Image: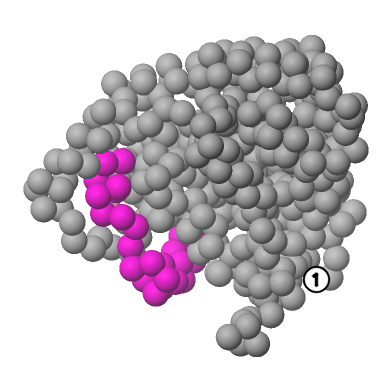
Amino acid sequence: MNKNLASRLVNIAPFHVMELAKMAAELEKQGRNIIHMGIGEPDFTAPQVVIDAATQAMQNGNLQYTSALGLPELRAAISDYYLKYYQLTVPSSRIIVTAGASAALLLACAALVEPGAEVLMPDPCYPCNRHFVAAFEGTPHLVECGPEVGFQLTDEMVQKHWTRLSKGVLLASPSNPTGTSIPRAELAKIIATVKAKQGFTIVDEIYQGLTYNDETFSALSLDDEVVVINSFSKFFNMTGWRLGWLVVPESIVPQIEKLAQNLFICPSTVAQYAALACFSDATMSIYEHRKAEFLRRRDYIVPALKSLGFEVPVTPDGAFYVYADCSRFSDDADQFTKDLLEKAGVVIVPGLDFGPYTARKYVRISYATSMENLQEAVLRIKNYLMTAVI
């Protein structure tokens, strides 16, 4: 069958995060205790009220297909969320509920990415972003973004790297793997530049709820034609429920609906009814408490990593990741993470997944685990570095 495989597959790289997770699972089968700081998954699960809402939906028999655009009640609840927490009027008619943020990005790329079109994005960035562009036969145009710009694209970079083949930009704020955000004024300039070039701007905001500075905003406040992706996975702690949403200009909703009908039928009905319980004041209070705990962990792990000899050139202002330079210890971040897993029982992720620019020097550390685990991991890493021959 190999001769029948589509040629586009050569542009899709393996996900090394998952490979390390498989290695860790094998060690755990052997009885090893492993601390996981690799996969970007909150250690908090959905609050009980969300679980109860799912149970109630099943008991009531609310299990049929919904509209491809999602439950009207949930779309309205997301609209109210933007108004209450971001002072933004986003009509529910522009909101499409999706089978996770991955489905939202797939729909956006299916609608906007032409074969051969270039889409600018930062290097480093979440690997699936560039792979979705490649899946629709577009060309991810990775732009090297170092710590001096917070590992994020700037308007100057967009103008410099835009070519006759460029059709849009794909940004993430806060970002995976760096936890850094694009300042409001800079994002406004990028959006204006791309719009002037008649291109599209997609902004991944799945970590928007986990922003720790005072400048919490959505790209939707800057321009109505921006396409925004969000998720119930991170801030709302519903990773396995596979539910997200997409906000698009009113004019392209029918096209997105047509794609969603054909590709997904609809998102999980049970997950949608469960998500309705996310937006009550009581549930939001739980999420804000958990956000404060993530901030407490960040404020522990960043100085702890620096004390071990890692360079953390930019303190993350969002998500639950630290992007750290490990070149003091190794010139091969991939091998460094494998050695750390095997010898210290700690999973962190090499920069290899996130683009070539930082592949060999940087590692991503997730602090989406308990403070006790973070403290034990720091001790294990310290002991490893003291005994390792680098």
Quadrant location of the N terminus? bottom right
Vertical relation: 163 (above or below) 157: below
Q: Identify the residue under disc 1.
A: 165
Q: Nearer the viewer, residue 16 or 151?
A: 16
Q: Residue at x 61, y 44 (%)?
A: 23
Quadrant location of the C terminus? top right
| Residue located farthest toward the left when viewing the structure as drawn | 60
Left or right: residue 96 versus residue 2 is left
Residue 224 point in image, percent of width and height:
55, 50
Q: Is residue 259 visible?
A: yes
Residue 44 point in image, percent of width and height:
42, 27
Q: Is 256 included in the stretch rendered in magenta?
A: yes
- Give, as a three-letter code, the residue at label 1: Leu
Could you tell me which secondary element the residue under label 1 belongs to?
loop
Q: Is 333 included in the stretch rendered in magenta?
A: no
Vertical relation: 312 (above or below) 299: below
Q: Quadrant of residue 194?
A: bottom right
Q: Nearer the viewer, residue 252 or 96?
A: 96
Residue 385 point in image, percent of width and height:
81, 21
Left or right: residue 46 versus residue 336 is left
Q: Residue at x 16, y 46 (%)?
A: 57
Q: Residue at x 79, y 41 (%)?
A: 335
The magenta-colored residue range is 247-275
